[in-house]
Amino acid sequence: MKGYSVGIDDMALYVPSLYLPIKTIASERGIAYEKLNKGLGLEHLAIPDVHEDTATMAANAVVEIIEKNQLDPRTIGRIYLGTESALDGAKPTATYVLEMLRRKYRAQYGTACFQNCDVVDLTFACVGGVDALQNTLDWVKGNPDRMGIVVCSDFAKYELASTGEYTQGAGAIAMLVKHNPRLLAIGDTFGVAAMGVHDFFKPKKEVAKLQIIREVLNLAGVTDITAEETLAKLSRSLEVNGILDDNDAKLSIRKDTPIFDGQYSNLTYQNRIREAYLHFKNQKIKAGLIAENDPIMGNWERLIFHLPYAAHGRRIASELFMVELKAIGKWAAFAQENDLAEPQLADFENEALFQRATSQFLRAITKTKGYKEFTINKLAKAEVASSRVGNMYACSIFIALMGTLEEDLKDGENIAGKDFGFVGYGSGSKSKVFEGRIQPAWKEVVKSFDITKKLDNRTALDYATYEALHRMEQSTSIIPPNGEFGLSEILTTTNKEGARYYEWKERKDRKTVKKQMLSGKMI
């Protein structure tokens, strides 16, 4: 079929060695465990160690792709990174990944082994990884010799005790994009819907020096001098000798934790995926590939959603389910059978009341037998891995894919030649809908994913250690890097302040690592 000659040849998952059991956070926050576990599908939250960040996780995932496929770095034309956890406002995080890889492979392939590899960050909240994939697919199509790697890497960090805290997660996923892929061939058609909204964002905040000084004086209990008098003591020279001795009256602060409105974000998610789905279908109709009343989701063996938490797919897909049934002429019978009456705007005093009624109506759809069967068949397998990692932002749609494939392999499913539908979303907001076809060699590829093995071989955190990591009070790694990249230094010197340096730590056996940890020789 046209447009299915390029796609994902292989995938690799990197997940931190630490996790917080959802039981621990539920107990600490006074939330019923069943609400988080059964209601949202949460089991574990992957938490980065001191030496881990967006760059190390991405580089570790790319190394696995290179090693598994015995790739010559000089043949990799690009490494495009999808992330919303960038380490710098100008220097792409992908350049840190590139330098780590160059240092690791220079002895074997030369110091210029990645010199002709194009790198860039693509950021659009959680859909940035899909953007990087679509861009790379188009680039690979231009030449049969081209090969690229798409990597997604994120740490979904929320404020302590916030409503997003229990959905946290972290990790990276790398994908090898080639012609004639062994795993998943991806079609040309991408449905897109975008709108500028503030459902979730990480703004650069400006804080006046006067406000900072006032807070410090209040905290110190100082009453014999005012904040205004203290500020006046700062030098007016152009020389900068400290944080407050800055030439700007306001200081910029950027935090990793977002400002968000959960209910509004769900609404924008729901609206964008409907719009992108219809755009996808309309393109198929215009191209003469399907008729207006042909099914789309009905032809997809599995549905792969962006999952901010494991159960989100089955909670959010109800409108698409209705849209599909309407298109194929089965909605009226389904609505009558389940006593469902779709709200009409004309029947309500205002938009807010209509939206509330619509939300209740869509929730009622999720409780029907037909919808539950639909989600079990098409969505449930994606929840298994997601529940044990948490939100991975740009990675979430791809851990859903990897997890689904590993579950299909365990179950002995015959999915070669079957089509999967993908529904990506990024706050801000944008959705992309596309489809891919499972290739004959998929089982051999999926055998090397080792998702369950990786998730089983992790260490649970107690609450106190988790909070120390979250507050950035922990100065040494809980589990030192072993057979992976780790952050080694962040410079504070003039003209290099904030520059990050990394190194590869060769793998050592567990006994040696434990001995060195106990002796304090590893950090």
Image: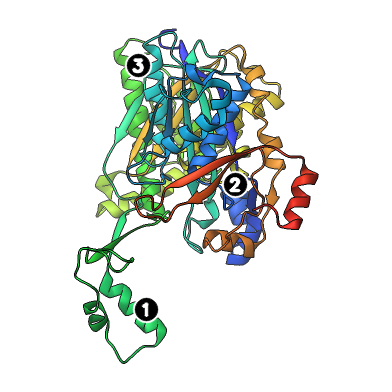
Which class describes the residues within 10 Å of circle 3: few (<14), some (14-19), or many (20+)?
some
State the mark number for residue 509. none
Q: Residue furthest right?
A: 511
- Give the colour scheme of this rendering: rainbow
Mark 1 to mark 3 CA distance (whole Å) = 61 Å
Which secondary structure, mark 3? helix
Mark 2 to mark 3 CA distance (whole Å) = 34 Å
Examine the rendered structure and indicate whether residue 401 appears above or below residue 225.
Answer: above
In the picture, residue 372 is in which quadrant?
top right
Q: Residue at x 61, y 57 (%)?
A: 476
User: Of marks 1 and 3, which one's residue comes earlier in the chain?
Assistant: 1
State the mark number for residue 216. 1
**Callouts 1 and 3 close, C-beta under 8 Å:** no
Mark 3, residue position? 284
Is residue 379 something one can see in this rendering? Answer: no
Examine the rendered structure and indicate whether residue 227 appears above or below residue 474.
Answer: below
Judging depth in this view, the residue of 491 and 216 nearest the camera is 491
Q: Position of residue 95 (x, y in %)?
A: 42, 35
Mark 2: which amino acid? Gly
User: Of marks 2 and 1, which one's residue comes earlier in the chain?
Assistant: 2
Is residue 405 something one can see in this rendering? Answer: yes
Q: Residue at x 71, y 42 (%)?
A: 457
Judging depth in this view, the residue of 45 and 52 nearest the camera is 52
Q: Residue at x 32, y 15 (%)?
A: 285
Mark 3: which amino acid? Lys
Mark 2, residue position? 41
